[in-house]
Amino acid sequence: MRHWAWALMVVAVPATATGDASIESVDVDLILERSMSRSPGMSLAPDLYLELEPEIEISLVHSHRARWLIGTGYGGCFDCDELFVQDEGPWNGTGLAGRWHYGLAGLHFDDFSPLKPWLQLGGYYQHSWGWLSIETQPYVGIALANRDQGNFDFFNIPARIRAAPVSFLRISFEPAFNSRIEDFLDWYALSIGGGVEVLLPADFEVGVYLGFPRAYGQLNDSGDRHLAVSLGWHGRP
């Protein structure tokens, strides 16, 4: 079960690349996330993005930033404590997603014990004005199993506003609104996050992010704070 998504990626990429599409770029991110409100308090999450032609992206993601597009939050894959000792149990927070033009679809697992899969259906839009850009990815999550054990339908409306005042620096502000579909008035939250990314030589970049997943709403918890540090690489085959 832990390796299902990697197997799907291995099968899907050659099948796509042999058609009219070709791999334009590869992005790899490794994100260390620290939660101030849960135990184990740390996670180490790798993300992989393949940009294909024409305007197709396939991603295998584990981090909260990649799966939710909001600030920071508790990611998945490797749960560990402050000494980087992995927590017992299978990996949590895994997803395989695809984006084509303005459409978005994916299959994600928040937990494996009990199994909590959900289907992601939504859209994607990005626009730039010189050094300023905005990106949004609204979607609904449809629970596929174990609704009686905490798996539920929800929607998420995130945005990422990014400024690049100089060529090697990016500053982002990342608000989002999310809620359960069934009991909207009793379960909603406004998330706020942001970060700074510095571009390095050899196509590497580092980033630092701070997020408040439940900054306002019925689930308001100002103590729910998350800090993330990322190392990324962007290359072309």
Image: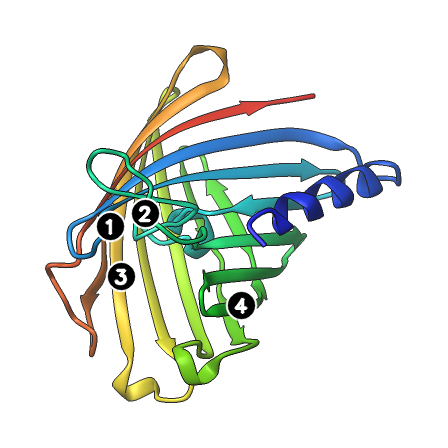
The tag earlier along the polypeptide, 2 or 4, is 2
Q: What residue type is labelled 4?
A: Pro
Q: In this view, does 202 lie to the left or right of 107?
A: left
Q: Which quadrant holds residue 192?
A: bottom left
Q: The N terminus is located in which quarter? A: bottom right
As helix, strand or loop, the secondary structure at mark 4 comes to strand
Residue 87 tag number: 2
Q: Give me the residue at 52% from left, 31% from top.
A: 28
Colour scheme employed for the rendering of this structure: rainbow
Position above or below: 57 against 189: above
Question: Alpha-carbon distance for marks 4 and 3?
Answer: 23 Å
3 vs 1, front mark: 1
Position above or below: 100 against 16: below
Toward the front, the furthest residue is: 88
Question: Alpha-carbon distance for marks 1 and 4?
Answer: 22 Å
Position above or below: 50 against 205: below
Label 3 sits on residue: 191
Residue 145, image x and y in percent?
54, 77
Question: Alpha-carbon distance for marks 2 and 3?
Answer: 27 Å
The tag earlier along the polypeptide, 4 or 3, is 4
Q: Which amino acid does label 1 sit on?
A: Pro
Q: Give me the residue at 60% from left, 52% from top.
A: 96
4 vs 3, front mark: 4
2 vs 4, front mark: 2
Q: Give me the residue at 35% from left, 88% from top.
A: 183
Badge 1: residue crowd in 10 Å (few <14, some 14–19, many ≥20): some
Question: Alpha-carbon distance for marks 1 and 2?
Answer: 7 Å
Question: Alpha-carbon distance for marks 2 and 4?
Answer: 21 Å
Badge 2: residue crowd in 10 Å (few <14, some 14–19, many ≥20): some
As helix, strand or loop, the secondary structure at mark 3 comes to strand
